[in-house]
Image (cartoon, rainbow, N blue to C red):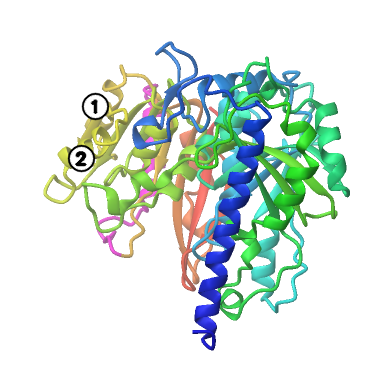
Amino acid sequence: QNGNPGSRHHNNQISTIAMQRCLSLVFITILNQANIVEGLLFQHQPITESRIRQPLSTTTTTTRRMSTSSNLKESMSKTKDNGRFPSRELLIHWRGEKDVGYSKPFRQLEFASALLAELEVPTEGESMLQFQNALNYSGNAKMADVNIEHFNEAMQFVTLNEEGCSKEDIQVPRDAIISTVERSALVHACYEVIAASENIEELAELAIQDGGFEDMYKGAANEKATWCFRARNYGDIPVTTTEIVVGKEKRYSSSARSMKLEKEGLKALTELLLKFGGKVDLLNPDCKVYIFDGLEGGTKILARRIAVGPRTSIIAPTTRICITNTPLEPIASFSLCNVARIRNGMAILDPYAGSCATLLASAMIAPQSQTVGIEIAHNGIVSRDNIRKDFSSRNLTQPVALLQGDSTNQTIRDEAKTAIQYRPFDAIIADPPYGIRESLSYNDKSPLEELFGSIAKDRQTNERLLRKGGRLVSFVAVTDEETLEEMLPSDDLAREAGLAFEVSREQPLNDKLSRWLVSYVCKE
């Protein structure tokens, strides 16, 4: 075994795990002896599918998705918050990609749109936020330029862009940031930067001066909230041949955890951590404290994780009862919904619903919304009963109507509006047939052109399908022999529908095909 490199690697892994456990147990013992571990302020539960939405308080009238305890979240939103964009810098760790560049084009647009939905403000585009890379590759491994770019953009600082809007004009409470993260499928986690210094020994003092952890102190609102400490090193770490092939270094994810930095960090943060009143919980803490080293600028950062992104995997096609040939994946469904800026109380229509992937995402993001799906396929192909089971099995709000028919049919559209008390929809979200597996030979018009025509017709009769200020967000398939402009409805048709083009993003599917996300606003 000693001559087997694989065995030595296995033994090293075992030694590392053992060292991690011993260090954690020793630290917990020290804290217990310091008499600062006393018990839970509230009963902590792990996040499950049934807890996708939880009340902010004991009332049942307001629902929110929770990644932390409701009491902890409420108190955090009141800490050092003047009602405007948080004075502390935010750090976003984006969700990883299976294929490089697959979801990256949607990241910033989805997050900015989700934030504007939470704020309920009409500001257009991403101009209100500014994103700056937090990583700068300095490893010793040879990597393709596209992989280096992918690595550098995996974590980004986000601030308010004063050129795009004034801090006095836009008020962003911390609770809105948390809610935005919890509905953004492309966000892995969001951290609030409490202190930064080249010297790790200065972080505790700076954090105490800042007051970013005051709610965790003895006698404060979250004195018994559980917590843990972790350290991540994004510095110059050697990589193996396997890691170079996939274009990622070990430091990209949780394997960037540094036991050496954690040991140094625990010692340096002792003065701060001894002020905490709650227990250490290494498995499921209410608050995670981090030190990040090796970020852009060379400083060490002390941060607290304030929210994590949603568990989109619970609506993955492989987990659903209703099975179709071309289901929309959760990331795409969430992106459509967030760019459409849906929120509670809205009426949402999918005129090409299929197995209702977009409506499942809508129910996760805005459980108090009303959704309607129209699908031309009969129940033998798309079972409405199975679709409803997909909602009920996940404790998600059911669509108010699942209609079989063609959305270009006036009667079907009238039925859709009747289901929401015959008023215009606030958002239309669509993933029309691409014409690749589905035949579109019955009509020279594309599905999106037909939809624009239907909106124009209803507008002319003063029986609007989409309200003024509402959004239409859709995917548009474009081959390598086509342009987006060729595949979009004409400007004349858009004017007839009262729609103004807002934004577009390209998502490459393969060498021959891209899927564009396009958004229109109903102006007239």
Q: Position of residue 186 (x, y in %)?
A: 54, 48
Near-viewer residue (201 or 381): 201
Q: Secondary structure at mark 1?
A: helix
> Crowding near pointer 1: few (<14 within 10 Å), some, many (20+)?
some
Quarter location, residue 466: top left
Q: Position of residue 39 (x, y in %)?
A: 53, 23
Going by the numbered disc 2, the residue's amino acid type is Gly
Note whether 209 is above or below 476 in the view shown: above
> Crowding near pointer 2: few (<14 within 10 Å), some, many (20+)?
some
Magenta segment boundaries in residue numbering: 437-463
Going by the numbered disc 1, the residue's amino acid type is Glu
Residue shown at the point (63%, 21%) measured from the top left: 223
Pointer 1: what residue? 415
Quarter location, residue 117: top right
Q: Position of residue 200 (x, y in %)?
A: 83, 47
Q: Examine the structure image and report whether residue 254 is included in the region drawn in magenta.
A: no
Residue shown at the point (77%, 54%) measured from the top left: 295
Q: Give the label on residue 405, or none.
A: 2
Q: Earlier in the sequence, mark 1 or mark 2?
A: 2
Cβ atoms under marks 1 and 2 closer than 8 Å: yes
